[in-house]
Amino acid sequence: MKQVPLVEQHLKEFRKYLKHRHQIKGLVGVGRDSNQLNCLNAVLKDTDIIICTAQILYNAFETSIMDEDEQVLITDFSLIIFDECHHTDKEAVYNKIMMHYLLVKEEGTHPLPQIVGLTASPGTGRAKNIQTATAHVMQICANLDAWELVVVQHHMKELMTYTNDPVKHYEIADKRERDLFADRVKNIMRMIHDQFDHCDMTCSENFGSQSYEQFIVELEKKGVEQARRHVQMCARHLRKYNDALLINDTVRQVDAYKYLESFHEDENTKETLDDTDNFLAKVFAEHKEELDAISPEEKCENPKLERLQHTILTAFLSNQQSRGIVFTRTRQSAMALHEWMSQNELLRDVGVRSQYLTGAGNQVGHMTAPEQSEVLLNFRDGSLNLLFSTTVGEEGLDIKECNFVVRYQHATNETAMVQARGRARASDSTYSIVADSCSIEEHLEHTNEMRVHLMMKAIETVRAYDKEIYLQKIRKLQEDSIAEWKQKRKKEDERTNEYPATQVKLLCRNCHIAMCGGNDLRIVDGMHRICVRKDFSDIYIESNALDEPMKFAQLEIGGSISCKKCKEPWGMQMIFKCIKLPCISIKSVILQMNDSRETRRSLKSWSKVPFAVKPFNYVQHCKEMEPFT
């Protein structure tokens, strides 16, 4: 499974039919239920069927490479089923698992498990013609080592009793007649732009867009790597103002204002380091009162919310037992829509009871797996009848009472469209698109409809291949994939050995003080980077301690850690066998090699660092820390 909620859903169904004959267990990576945190290799010994997130399986394979005592191999299984198998592509975790399979297959020395992939939509890979779409479907089949591509033919009537083709509606909204809040925010952004010496000012016309966000992310990275804190911090604030414009475009002005206010409240807790910090704080302070006064103004409210309100009201007035899901792009917008709903008297009067559903994670502020489970349980039993969800709810959720789905200012690809539409399980269901007139979202939805037709033709083309020709194509694609993987692995090994760990320093992303050296880092569970420097606790503070620590594999998450000097978040405080281990987020640090500013790097993933990190040794760590405990 790709998502934690699907593990719990499938576990319930498997136990319903197979518990009398087989031992069945479910595993998820994050949770407060310690029974779910058994190591996969231990569970394998006495379990017939394991239902888990794909990341757990992949982590087990990768850990096996470093630790033979914890060894889990692809050959330990006789059958692996990939639900929503269209994700077996590119760098997705499904595809990484299958690369372990293909490498063993290439050796030809061990029996392999049977692979079964299930999906309602393999997609087209954003293809524009039948040739490219067919190539995409073939690549998915090759990645899954599929002997055959099978579609339902003989039991179509039975299938239709479990599925539904909802009626589609386009709820297109007019643009706001005026948007004073956005105008003021853009003026602030122009003031910050004026501080740059060499900035591409053409981007100022794209304020509030995804393209501007990409531009400003690159600008912040450039500021970090060039040791120009002035550029870095201005870009950081511009990104928050751009986020506020996106929130304002999606929900209400007051939601956008609260987002900015919360960000600046956090910034004000940090130490002022230079004139740039003073300038950025002053700019917001000078406009804060005006933005606060504008944000509640109803005359400038979002027309899309009116269309959404109409859609929800129509559903509940026609059927008081309605249950629906509204999909939106971000966690912030899901939470803001829930708040809007809770303050909407019209919707409350018709009996709407809502909650938001977002992705689980090990960061403070994210939903935990138990919180997700509770929301879905309440939605299933009718305690809640409306969810505002991010993409976490798009795939696989089977709630037969759900009779309307809305994609709110949110469109991606044809696979996501089919998946979201499929959540409307009840008869007489509806699937609605709420978007601005002539928007990218409206255009994408029409494009995706054409791509679905293209996908069906591609599937027919693949199924029509002569068996021998099909298998030849599969083998060639697999050979190419293995060759490409080996080249990537070679480059990764070269990058990992680019610098000795002793020549690398980690700097605080905000104030640039030295945190630790690369040789002070260790890897826990094959994925978490912790600092084992003896005096590291002298330069950070621990905060936001959780009342009930989250559990992640063998670790507990007790709270967050921040720079003692500037209060910049650095990561999480983890507890492993009663020992506190500061876990560092790569997004909170700057890497500097050879004590040279010219070598600074800002990275998004620990897998990209140019030095090797040793695995964590618990016994050795205890011995080294004895004088300090």
Image: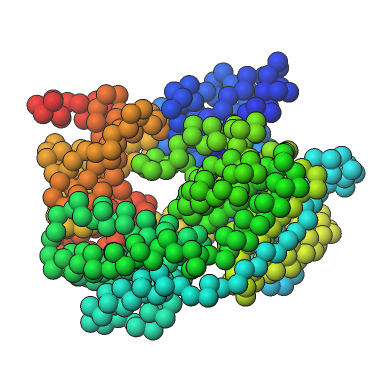
As drawn, 316 above or below 458: above
Quarter of the picture containing the N terminus is top right
As drawn, 15 above or below 148: above
Residue 276 appears at what percent x and percent y? 17, 68
Residue 584 appears at what percent x and percent y? 28, 45
Which of 507 and 65 lies nearest the eye of the viewer? 507
Quadrant of res 477: bottom right
Which of 608 and 199 lies nearest the eye of the viewer? 199
Which of 19 and 550 lies nearest the eye of the viewer? 550
Answer yes or no: is residue 80 visible: no
Residue 466 appears at what percent x and percent y? 83, 58
* Lateral position of residue 248 relative to residue 467, left or right: left
Residue drawn where x is 42% and y is 73% of the image: 180
Residue 419 appears at what percent x and percent y? 67, 51
Residue drawn where x is 68% and y is 27% of the image: 14
Tally the marks: 0
